Amino acid sequence: MSFSTILSAAVDGLQAELIRVEADVSNGLPVFHMVGYLSSEVREAGERVRTAVRNSGYEYPPKRTVVNLSPATVRKRGASFDLPIAAAVLAALGQIPAGSAKDCLMIGELGLNGSVGKVPGILPMVMEAARRGIRRCIVPEENAGEGRLVKGVEIIGVSSLKEAALLLQGKPCAKRRKAGKEKEREEERTLEGRIPDFAELQGQENVRRAAEIAVAGGHNLLMIGPPGSGKSMTARCMAGILPPPDEEESLEITRIYSVLGLVDPESPLIRKRPFREVHHTATRAALIGGGTVPQPGEISLAHGGILFLDELPEFNRSVLEVLRQPLENREIRLSRTHGTYRFPADFMLVAAMNPCPCGNYPDLSKCRCTPSQIQMYLDRISRPFLDRIDLCVEAPRVGFGSLTGTARQESSEEIRNRVVRVREIQKRRYEKEGIRNNAALRTEDLKRYCVLGNKEKKLMERAFSHMELTARGYHRILRTARTIADLDGEERIRENHLREALSLRMIDEKYWRR
């Protein structure tokens, strides 16, 4: 037989598409010709495949070889097609039985010695294969654990072309490696050890309370205070009180990291919500994603977790403005020549900043900034951006008594237990709505889940006028009050819940007066 077909897959954004690798070997000039809308790294596969086939102990006669990657409308990138190309060529040469790879997906990069190396994006490829009814996948040994996260598909890891060829000949020899559960648990403990505990944070009761409310409801948080007041440490402590993701969320987070090749082969399933800390020199593309074929950026890498921006006014204003749409719609849509790409962006924004360039305002005895300098510094944060912040809290300088005191501080575990309880309440309440927390409540849902009594309506009417709230700001206060009520175990939003929610939005009035 001079013609054969092997199934493979290509990742485009976060989506995968099945690719048919067709090989035809015939008499003629000894050339290796590849077609099918290929990038340069895919075209180079010809040299890798021919050398790997010979070094794996198989004959490669001087014949005309044509390889087509179909459909031709999909751009093919990366080295993941090496293994299926080699298998298709061997089948066309008759060195692998015809039809042995039927309903089998193959993915892998080849070394010149015939070894199979890991490639990014295995998880979305296997997920697409499962959706299309394929029940067997041959992948690099290093990616096998990642592929096995998908149920209903047999994942076979191979470390060489020889192993893959013997497997297709009906002689299984691939070694199967499974990550031990004890190792996974140990890794989790190690990861937790790198997260500071709220018990180490001295003082700052109002900041601790705001952080708990923010995580309990998935709200955005801005902390303002002088240098050394514990803002950055608070943000990092928040990573330790995030509730664990369920299985569906873990797979969604892992899929994003898989595309970028950031999955740990030993423990591929990401069991903790991400915490991404971004430097203020980051570009717009670094945040939202970019490239000729866009890949996820820091916003998508923070999906399901926290995106922390320290020294907020030091970010380029145009960079901050790109956050407005993801904060509102919880997804990113990028339009390119080849199509529209959608990346998930359901994250909590936690930001920290000094009140002025020197960091001492409003303590006029220490602040050396002029009013115009302070105003220019604060104006780097636009009102529309601030309007998307649910909680704004002041972090005052920590006193000597707080640092040396013996008062017991709540640990992250104690706070996390309350957060988990409140998240479970929200999960049950919004089960039919398809949302997971109060921050994701749609405008039309507020009338149903954030019902106000007469006293509460009068309070909000006065606040709406006095604080000159926008409709967006008003709705965000209601969502925050809903979370505070959940923390208190109340079914309905009371006046005290609204007052606390309002107090957590009034700090910005102190600095950004209209």
Image (tube, rainbow, N blue to C red):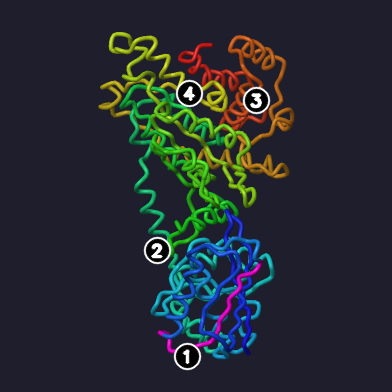
| Residue numbers of the magenta segment | 55-71
Image location of residue 250, percent across then percent down: 54, 54
Q: Amino acid at mark 4?
A: Ile
Nearer mark to the viewer, of 4 and 3 = 4
Disc 1 marks a residue whose amino acid type is Glu
Spatial CA distance of label 2 from label 1 is 43 Å
10 Å neighbourhood of mark 1: few (<14), some, or many (≥20)? few
In the image, farthest residue toward the front: 29
Task: State the residue in front, 206 or 362.
Answer: 362
Are discs 2 and 3 less than 8 Å apart at CB?
no
Q: Which of the two labelled residues, at mark 2 and mark 4, occupies the earlier sequence position?
A: 2
Q: Residue at x 52, y 78 (%)?
A: 32
Q: Which mark is residue 59?
A: 1
Q: Which residue is under mark 2?
A: 183
Quadrant of the frame with the N terminus = bottom right
Residue 359 counted in the magenta span:
no
Distance between the alpha carbons at the discs numbered 2 and 4: 45 Å
Residues under numbered marks 2 and 4 in contact, where contact means CB atoms less than 8 Å apart: no
Name the mark on residue 280.
none
Residue situated in front as seen by the camera: 488 or 483: 483
Please, what is the three-letter code of the amino acid marked with disc 2? Lys
